[in-house]
Amino acid sequence: MTVHIAKVKVRPRKNLPPNVCAVELSNMLGCWAATGDTLASNQCQVAAEALFQCMRTAPIRGKQPRSSINYHLARLGRNSK
């Protein structure tokens, strides 16, 4: 069942904020790939410490609110009949 309602506008989703520690994570993964030091005990220790510090100080994001557009469209469809 398709509901056709005239002049209904839906706002586009907002962009999510970028990952704060993406650079540090990519540096550590690149170091692991280049050296094979997955325990971060030798060459990758600096990259692992930078990632650890970034994750420690990164702000904690809460759960994103869920869109209620389907609820409102269903109500409009009920009222228009």
Image (cartoon, rainbow, N blue to C red):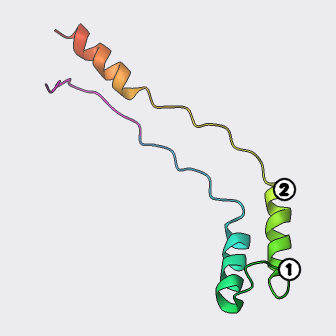
Residue 18 x, y percent position in the rendering: 62, 58
Residue 31, by quadrant, is bottom right
Name the amino acid type tagged 2: Arg
**Residue 63: percent from the left, percent from the top?**
62, 36
Q: Residue at x 36, y 20 (%)?
A: 72
The earlier-in-sequence mark between 2 and 1 is 1
Quarter of the figure with the C terminus: top left
Let me know if residue 49 is in the magenta part: no
Q: Which residues are magenta?
A: 1-11
What number is the disc on residue 46? Answer: 1
x%, y% of residue 9? 33, 32
Q: Check residue 56 in the rendering and tell me which mark sits there, or answer none.
A: 2
Q: Secondary structure at mark 1?
A: helix
Secondary structure at numbered mark 2: helix
Q: Main secondary structure of the magenta part?
A: loop
Q: Quadrant of residue 1?
A: top left
Horizontal side, residue 63 vs residue 1: left or right: right
